[in-house]
Image (spheres, rainbow, N blue to C red):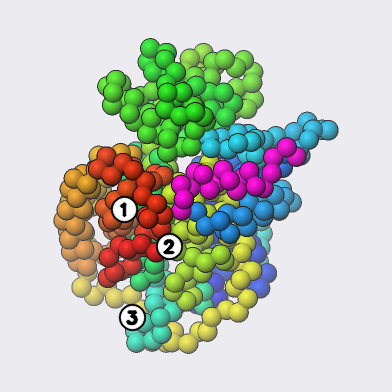
Amino acid sequence: MREKTEILVLGSGVAGLTFALRAADRAEVTIVTKRAREEANTAWAQGGISAVFDPTDSFDAHVEDTLVAGAGLCKRDIVEGVVREAPERILDLETLGTKFDHAPAGGAAPFELGREGGHSARRVVHAGDITGREVERALLDAAAAHPRIRFLEHHMAVDLITLSKFGGPDVCAGAYVLDTRTGTVLTLLARETVLATGGAGKVYLYTSNPDVATGDGVAMAYRAGAEVADMEFYQFHPTVLYHPQAKSFLISEALRGEGGVLRLEDGTAFMKKHHAQADLAPRDVVARAIDYEMKRTGEDCVWLDMTHHPASFLERRFPNIHAECLRFGVDMTQRPLPVVPAAHYMCGGVTTDASGRTSIPGLWAIGEVACTGLHGANRLASNSLLEGLVFGRRAAEAMIDLGPADGWSDVPEWDAAQAGPSDEAVVVTQNWAELRQLMWNYVGIVRSDKRLQRAARRIALLQDEIREYYWNHFVTRDMLELRNIATVAELIVSSALFRRESRGLHYTTDHLATDPAMARDTVVKRGVPAHFR
Ligand code: SIN
């Protein structure tokens, strides 16, 4: 089957929807989403969106906090532009119907502002503790009402279509897309293709991300020959609920913003000895400190104590976290919450310019899938929804002239001639589990050359098996996701092996110092080994 659309967007989170709503004023937009449209990483964001609204705060301070967290790898011009645009983008969301928490009338700022690690001021605009869900709701409502936006739910891109593969120019012209319910693959041709596929938390055994976060955009872009950068910088959120049934439940950093204290089992508060900002140190520091304390004491988790607040405050400010923890039998108003770190955010990604253009004409990347220079070696809390808003809009504005539709007739339909039904689906489940476990054990919060080398060897073996399986069987979503997390794992490990220093989120016991000569991006491209730029 073959279809055409003007603009193809892969992903239905904050970046993809913001883009689509703006671009659909000029062109017809098709949004492809792997599951139901609301199942995006965005909906899981709790904390909020950072922006300067308090008169005692300043753009300079927000810029400085972002640069400090980014450990020398942020692009200053990008940071300054995003920080200055932030208040306007939040007001756009409010106009669209997003219900943020407001400050009492007559207050200095219009919104109730939260605080998170690494921020020198209160500047996190939020909707209770379900900010992402509320933002996603408002954007989806608006997109559903737009006559030029079409959703293809339960569809997953297999690979990008690049005309150079069929003797044409180096241009992206859409994607092969699997209907996950029927198993048919659609040739979806587009003048412009936008990756808004989010992150890749599922590459690690423990993650705060939903099941959809399998790094599809980075993996496809890499296979298509696009440039990818800074993949060694995977952010671990310090606090996910530690409970056998609580898969991926995030305990927002906003709790520490309201005075939450991390403690050991015996009640000792330990963050002061790790950093001057104690519990509000940047995330990489807090995650490493927890990892260190857990390894030192042999305890399975640490404890986040909020009991200094009255129950009424916690129930009002964190209604979702409070209710969800109660479901697991933990009452945060009465006792500290058991927490552990988990993979949370991919700071690297497909490299783009200030408007989301990648190194392949006709291919754009926005949101977590992109590496724009905003986050550098470590993302500042609550700068991620913000990046999606800013770059979603910028890409739509930059896409004034749609690319040509030449060469489409040369694109063949998906060829499944050699493939048959799966005879051993266990290959997928086995490799999925093995890959995520080895990434957790060898490529986690603290790394070493030896562990990274072990990981590289094992990933190469797994990839051989995955390739063989891929070419011989009909494609399924599970298979494609496995292939994509394996590619992302390969890129994280090769970038981490190349960076022989510790910086931001990349911390290795073999190269503990930060080397000023390495204040550069690690770039990888198919057929070109990792190098600095
Ligand atoms: C959180 O609420 O702690 C997550 C916010 C973020 O990742 O920016």
Q: Earlier in the sequence, mark 3 or mark 2?
A: 3
Up/down of 525 relative to 462, above or below: below
**Magenta run includes residue 56:** yes
Name the residue: 54% across, 72% down: 7
Q: Identify the amino acid type marked 1.
A: Arg
Cα separation between marks 1 and 2: 18 Å
**Residue shown at 18% from the left, 45% from the top:** 450
Residue density around tag 3, few if under 14, some if 14–19, many if 20 or more, within 10 Å:
few
What amino acid does circle 3 point to? Lys
Does the residue at mark 3 contact the one at mark 2 (Cβ under 8 Å)? no
Q: Residues within 10 Å of mark 2 (few under 14, many from 20)?
A: many
* Near-viewer residue (73 or 177): 73
269 relative to 491, above or below:
above
Residue placed under numbered mark 1 in the picture: 499
Q: What residue appears at the point 44 percent right and 72 percent down from the top-left corner?
A: 359
Q: Which residues are magenta?
A: 55-73
Q: Amino acid at mark 2?
A: Val
Q: Of callouts 1 and 2, which one flags the residue occurring earlier in the amino acid sequence? A: 2
**Residue 36 visible in the picture:** no
Q: Which mark is residue 165?
A: 3
Please tell me whether residue 518 is drawn above or below residue 339 in the rendered image: below
The C terminus, quarter of image: bottom left
